Amino acid sequence: MSDIKKIKDEYLAKINNNHNLDNLNQIKSELFGKNGIIALEFKKIGSISANEKKQFATNLNLIKDELQIALNKGFKTIEAKEINSKLQNEKLDITLPERNFNQGKVHPVSQVIDEISSIFSEIGFSVEEGPDVENEYNNFTALNTPDNHPARDMHDTFYLDKKKEYLLRTHTSPVQVRTMNNGKPPFKIIAPGRTYRSDSDQTHAPMFHQVEGLHIDKNINMGHLKGCLNYFIKEFFEVKKIKMRFRPSHFPFTEPSAEVDIGYEIKDGNIVIGEGDKWLEILGCGMVHPNVLKNVKVDPKKYQGYAFGIGIDRLGMLKYGINDLRAFFETDYRWLNHFGFDPLDVPSNYRGLSR
Ligand code: DAH
């Protein structure tokens, strides 16, 4: 026992003289480490005679506590010393002028995509994505647009290879094909994203954005399509009433097909959506063609539904009074600062994304 007492005195002295963090940590592991002095002493208990055992253990515990307390005190002293020296040496000069602070803005296209996704997710649509580089089959053939169909030329496609197997998707409709090929009906999705056509003027850019919508289930009819679009347009433009008309049209992937116009008027130089006697085309839609359903192995006798494709940039231009589409993609910081959105500003019709 005298041995351990000696060790104790020796270590107490070491602790009291050593006010340096590294040394204290070293002492701690020598004493209390897995194979440290204290652990080794405890191991001896097994070989001690029964009448000495109790005394030995009591003493050892007392010594252990004493060392522990001294060590903790040592650590506390060092901590206090460090804090004091920090307080003395680190001074904040609050008279210094602040650094230049540039806050980023959310691009209007991203903002509009978020708003659209939020509105549709409220009524049960989930958000799907597809790649910008598509194959010819998903972009055209599966969508009932065979070779030599005039719609292929109308789309001014950017092909990526001589065989015309790969292309930059000309619309978001191939996400319909991908979604239906990868799942089982019912489907209720929107797919916002980038699309490409070789076209450029004040209202057309070679890269632009669309959102595709698809709702396939049993007994879905054109009334559902009308109701859904009416709801969306009202929510998006934040108006109570909307004038909306369906004009017969043609898309290879829908039958019947329609284009949708909304009413507007110009008041004091500003466009007012939902009133007036002027019409503005904003989207294409229709009932999904049975051939499309067959191509993705959905039985058109059991399932049917509607689809639509909306130009996102156009909607953004209308809602936020931006009149040149090309400005969207010129990455002019001043423009973005003016038309962009504060990331922390939540629009009034925003209800959070379910993504
Ligand atoms: N994909 C068409 C386009 O880019 C838009 C469109 C029309 C999409 C009708 C649809 C639809 O899903 O049903 O011009």
Image: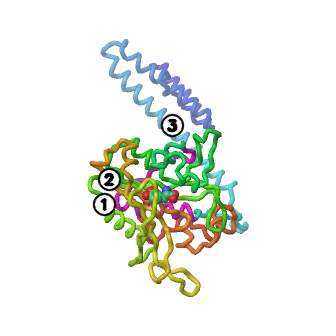
Q: Nearer the viewer, mark 1 or mark 3?
A: 1
The total of numbered circles placed on residues is 3
Question: Three-letter amino acid code at disc 3?
Answer: Ala
Of 299 and 57, nearer the camera is: 299
Circle 3 — which element?
helix
Residue 35 in the magenta stretch? The answer is: no
Observer able to see residue 19: no
Disc number placed over residue 347 in the picture, else none: none
The residue stretch that appears in magenta: 108-134
Disc number placed over residue 70 in the picture, else none: 3
Q: Quadrant of residue 97?
A: bottom right
The correct choice, above or below, for 327 with respect to 140 in the image is below
| Residue 256 drawn at (x, y percent) | 38, 60
| Residue 277 drawn at (x, y percent) | 47, 83
Which callout, 1 or 3, points at the residue further toward the start of the chain? 3
Neighbour class for label 2 at 10 Å: few (<14), some, many (≥20)? many
The correct choice, above or below, for 172 with respect to 280 in the image is above
Q: Nearer the viewer, mark 3 or mark 2?
A: 2
Q: Which colour scheme is used?
A: rainbow
Contact, mark 2 vs mark 1 (Cβ under 8 Å) = yes
Instruction: Residue under label 1, please give it.
Output: 221
